[in-house]
Image (cartoon, helix red, strand yellow):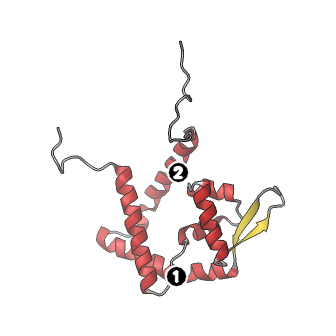
Amino acid sequence: MAQRGEAKVPVIVELSIANAMASHLFDRESERRGLRVTQVGLLVMIGKHAPITPTALEDVTGLAPTTLRDRVRTLVGDGYVHRLPNEADRRSYLLQPTDEGVAFLRSAKPVIRATEQAISRHLGSPFEEYRAQLERLTQAAHTALHEAPPLRAGGTNRGSAVVST
């Protein structure tokens, strides 16, 4: 039996904690510099992939549809993103940063840089050195997410397995 303090925290939990702390550090640096805290990460991804449908944005961010819809609504309401008609699928629309959104991202770059530098100082190595590992981790999680069947209501997959008699 493991004694208190001996059991390692699962890596996925450590990753989640690191994300929460990095996000908090970013928010604190944003506030310190007078930059309004908003959905910067999502806006970066919209800018990188624009014009992009909400469904494609779900795929590249891993966000649940309802979470994505709420965050996009905030970005649209703030004037950072606009919805454009999707000529290929009239039931959908495309997301694209507005000029104000592009300007906001430009103003966020020093905050992003400062946040990465703060973490790098404590790592003892440049943050950029972790990019290849993070991209590999993201790709592996993306692949795993798409090969697993979606959970049913209640968070289970009961009844989805083949049972032989």
Q: Quadrant of residue 17?
A: bottom left
Residue at image point 68% right, 59% down: 54
Whole-Å distance between the Cαs marked 1 and 2? 31 Å
Residue 91 visible within the image: yes
Tag shown at residue 139:
2
Task: Tell me the amino acid under the disc marked 1.
Answer: Arg
Judge from the rendering whether residue 132 lies leftward or rightward of residue 53; answer left or right.
left
Residue 32 found in image quarter: bottom left
Q: Nearer the viewer, mark 1 or mark 2?
A: 1
Judge whether residue 124 can be spotted in this image: no
Residue at (47% x, 76% y) in the render: 112
Question: From the image, which quarter does the N terminus lie in?
Answer: top left
Task: Identify the residue shown where x is 63% and y is 78%.
Answer: 78
For numbered disc 2, what is the local secondary structure?
A: helix
Residue 36 tag number = 1
Residue 155 in percent (x, y) is at 50, 41
Badge count: 2
Query: Where is residue 97 drawn, in percent x and y?
Result: 68, 74
* 142 sits to left or right of 9: right
Residue 61 vertical placement versus 122 (above, below): above
Task: Name the residue rendered at 58%, 59% in the picture.
Answer: 67
Query: Between 28 and 122, which is closer to the camera in this rendering?
Result: 28
- Circle 1 — which element? loop
Residue 97: assigned label: none
